[in-house]
Image (cartoon, rainbow, N blue to C red):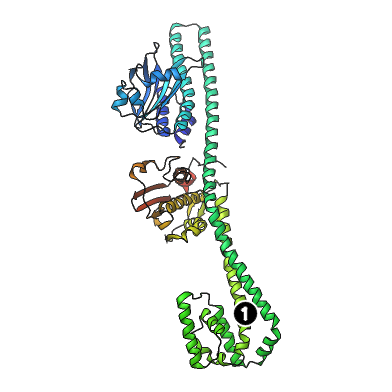
C-alpha cells in the first residue's frame, strides 16, 4: 500500500481547511486507490441533489458540478452508507450519462454523517477498470469520511457563526460563539488523534508486510541453502574417511616404510620429494572416456620402458596427472623401492587431499552461513552505510547459487565503481526480489545477466533475462501491491512494490523494458550521501 499521500495529508491536516482540504483529500484518495475520478459532495436540503465540494479527474482538479441523485449509484449509496460495484455500474445505472460518457466500470462510495447521525455528504471513487482491491478502498474511504464530516460541519458552523456575528453585537453572544469554536477545535483534535492512531496501525501493517515478504523469500531459498551446505559437508565426511584409512595403512606399516626411506640414496629421495609436491598440487581428476584412453596409453608406455608398474599404480598416476612424467621420474619408477613404498606415497597424497577439500568446504559453508545471516536479519538499521554494491549483490547470489548450478546460466558484468551510501539490508531485499523474479521468468532454465556500472553521479544496476517477458497489458500494474504474474501460491505480489519504495527511499529509480524473450530491470542509485540522509520516509520502522 502506498500511503505517502495519506501521510502528507494527515501531517498537514490541522493547517488545511475548506476547499484546499477537500481538493487535497480527493487527490490523495485518487493516488492511493488508483481511481480515475474522485469527488466529495454535499447533499442538498431536499436530499435530491449533490453539489461537489472538490472533483478530481485523472489526477487533476476540475470545476465542481451539481447533479440530481435520481437514477445514479449515489442514490443507493445514501440508503446503504457504503456501496461498491466491481465492473457493472454502467449496466446497473444506464440513466447516469456521466458514467457512460467516461466509460466507468467500477464504483465505490461512502456516506458522510454528522456526529448526530445526519447524512450531509458523500465521498465517491470511480474506476475505468474493474474494482478489485475493495478492502483497501473501503479502509481509505472510512478514514477520510470522519475527517470530511468534521470539515463539513466546521464549514457549516463557521458559516452560521459568521451570520450570527453580523446579526449580534453584544459581547455575551460573541463569547458563546468563541465557546462553540473551542468545542469544534477540540472535536477536530479528537479526530486528529483518531487519524494518527489509524496511521500508526497502517505503518505497523506495512512493516509486517515487509518482513513477511522478506521471510517468505527466505523460506523459498532455505531448502537450496541446506543442499548447498550438505554438499561440502558430505565431501568433508568422504575425504575424512579416506584420510583415516590412509593414516591407518601408514601406521600399520610404519616400520617397513621407515626402513625403505632410510635406505634411499639422496638423488632418489629428492625425486620422491618432487613427485610428492607435483602430485599434491593436482586437484582435477579425469573421468569417463578420456580416463580410459590415458590408462591404455600409460600401460603401453609402462611396457615399452619395462617399468613393471601394476595397473593400480598406473591408474593412480593418471588420476594425479603424472601419466606423462616418465622422462622425469623414470629412475624413480624403476627403483626397487618405488612399488613397495607406493602405498605410503599414495596415503600421504590422500591425507593432503582430504585437508585441502576440508579447507575449501569449510570456507564455502562459512560464506553461505554469513550470507544467510546477513539476509535474515529482522532489524534494519536507519544508519546510512558506505558499501561495495557488488559485494552486496554477491551475498544474495551466494544464497541462490544452487539454482544457478542447474539449467540457468549466470553472467556477471561488474565494473569497478565507487562505494555508495545506502541502507544495505534493504538493498539486499531488492536484489533478492529481482533475482527471484528473473529465475521464475526463465522457468529455472535460461540466461540471467547482472550488470553494475558507473554513470557519472550514480551507479546503474541492471538485471536481464531471456524469459517469456511481461505481457504489455499488465506492465503498468507490476509495481502495484499484491499484483503478481506468478501462478497461485508462488508470489505475494509485494516484491516489486517493496523494491520500488526501497529504491525511492534511496532517491534512486527503478524501471524496466520487456518483450517476449527479453526483460531488463534497471536500478539507479546516487553517490550523493546528503540526498540519502535527507530521505524523510522510511519503508518500515525498527
Q: Residue at x 50, y 56 (%)?
A: 400
Is residue 112 toward the left or the right of residue 65 in the image? right
Residue 346 image-quadrant placement: bottom right
Is residue 260 toward the left or the right of residue 133 in the image? right
Q: Which residue is mark 1?
A: 348
Classify 328 as above or below 425.
Answer: below
Classify 476 as above or below 141.
Answer: below
Q: Quick one: quadrant of the C terminus?
A: top right
Residue 5 position, x and y percent, is 44, 34
Q: Residue at x 36, y 43 (%)?
A: 475
Label 1 Cα crowd, 10 Å radius (few <14 / some 14-19 / many 20+): some
Would residue 292 be visible to someone looking at this image? yes
Q: Residue at x 49, y 23 (%)?
A: 146
Would residue 527 be visible to someone looking at this image? no
Residue 526 position, x and y percent, is 43, 50
Nearer to me, 74 or 165? 74
Is residue 318 toward the left or the right of residue 132 in the image? right
Residue 493 position, x and y percent, is 46, 42
Q: Secondary structure at mark 1?
A: helix
Number of marks in the rendered image: 1
Nearer to me, 310 or 252? 310
Residue 245 image-quadrant placement: bottom right
Residue 357 position, x and y percent, is 58, 70
Classify 418 as above or below 172.
Answer: below
Nearer to me, 151 or 536? 151
Amino acid at each position: 500500500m502506498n500511503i505517502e499521500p495519506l501521510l502528507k495529508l494527515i501531517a498537514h491536516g490541522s493547517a488545511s481547511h475548506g476547499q484546499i482540504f477537500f481538493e487535497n483529500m480527493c487527490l490523495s484518495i485518487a493516488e492511493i486507490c488508483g481511481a480515475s475520478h474522485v469527488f466529495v459532495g454535499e447533499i442538498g436540503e431536499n436530499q435530491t441533489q449533490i453539489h461537489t465540494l472538490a472533483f478530481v479527474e485523472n489526477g487533476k482538479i476540475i470545476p465542481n458540478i451539481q447533479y440530481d441523485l435520481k437514477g445514479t449509484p449515489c442514490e443507493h449509496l445514501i440508503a446503504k452508507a457504503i456501496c461498491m460495484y466491481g465492473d457493472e455500474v454502467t449496466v446497473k445505472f444506464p440513466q447516469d450519462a456521466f458514467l457512460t460518457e467516461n466509460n466507468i466500470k467500477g464504483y465505490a462510495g461512502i456516506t458522510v454523517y454528522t456526529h448526530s447521525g445526519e447524512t450531509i455528504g458523500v465521498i465517491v471513487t470511480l474506476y475505468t477498470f474493474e474494482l478489485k482491491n475493495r478492502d483497501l478502498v473501503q479502509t481509505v474511504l472510512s478514514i477520510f469520511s470522519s475527517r470530511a464530516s468534521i470539515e463539513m460541519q466546521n464549514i457549516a458552523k463557521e458559516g452560521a457563526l459568521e451570520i450570527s456575528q453580523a446579526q449580534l453585537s453584544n459581547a455575551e453572544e460573541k463569547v458563546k460563539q468563541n465557546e462553540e469554536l473551542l468545542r469544534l477545535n477540540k472535536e477536530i483534535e479528537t479526530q486528529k488523534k483518531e487519524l494518527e492512531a489509524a496511521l500508526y496501525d497502517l505503518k505497523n501493517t506495512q512493516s509486517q508486510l515487509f518482513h513477511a515478504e522478506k521471510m517468505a523469500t527466505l523460506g523459498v531459498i532455505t531448502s537450496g541453502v541446506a543442499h548447498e551446505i550438505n554438499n561440502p559437508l558430505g565431501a568433508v565426511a568422504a575425504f575424512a574417511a579416506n584420510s583415516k584409512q590412509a593414516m591407518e595403512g601408514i601406521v600399520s606399516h610404519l616400520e617397513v616404510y621407515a626402513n625403505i626411506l632410510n635406505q634411499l640414496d639422496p638423488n632418489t629421495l629428492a625425486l620422491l620429494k618432487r613427485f610428492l609436491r607435483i602430485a599434491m598440487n593436482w586437484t582435477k581428476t579425469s573421468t569417463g572416456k578420456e580416463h580410459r584412453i590415458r590408462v591404455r596409453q600409460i600401460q603401453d608406455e609402462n611396457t615399452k620402458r619395462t617399468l613393471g608398474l601394476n595397473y593400480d599404480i598406473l591408474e593412480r598416476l593418471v588420476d594425479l596427472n603424472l601419466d606423462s612424467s616418465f622422462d622425469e621420474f623414470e629412475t624413480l619408477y624403476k627403483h626397487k623401492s618405488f612399488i613397495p613404498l607406493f602405498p605410503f606415497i599414495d596415503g600421504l597424497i590422500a591425507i593432503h587431499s582430504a585437508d585441502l577439500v576440508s579447507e575449501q568446504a569449510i570456507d564455502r559453508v562459512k560464506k553461505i552461513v554469513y550470507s544467510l545471516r546477513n539476509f535474515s536479519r529482522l532489524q534494519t538499521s536507519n544508519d546510512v552505510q558506505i558499501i561495495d554494491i557488488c559485494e552486496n549483490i554477491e551475498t544474495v547470489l551466494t544464497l541462490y547459487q544452487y539454482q544457478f548450478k542447474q539449467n540457468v546460466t549466470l553472467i556477471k558484468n561488474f565494473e569497478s565503481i565507487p562505494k555508495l551510501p545506502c541502507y544495505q539490508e534493504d538493498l539486499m531485499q531488492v536484489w533478492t526480489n529481482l533475482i527471484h523474479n528473473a529465475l521464475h521468468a526463465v522457468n529455472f532454465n535460461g540466461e540471467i545477466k547482472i550488470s553494475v556500472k558507473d554513470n557519472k553521479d550514480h551507479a546503474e544496476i541492471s538485471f536481464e533475462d531471456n524469459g517469456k517477458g511481461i505481457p504489455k497489458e499488465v506492465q503498468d500494474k507490476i509495481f502495484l501491491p499484491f499484483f503478481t504474474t506468478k501462478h497461485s501460491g508462488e508470489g505475494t505480489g509485494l516484491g516489486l512494490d517493496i523494491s520500488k519504495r526501497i529504491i525511492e527511499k534511496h532517491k534512486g529509480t527503478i524501471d524496466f523494458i520487456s518483450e517476449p524473450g527479453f526483460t531488463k530491470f534497471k536500478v539507479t542509485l546516487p553517490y550523493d550521501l546528503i540526498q540519502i540522509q535527507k530521505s524523510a520516509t522510511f519503508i518500515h520502522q525498527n
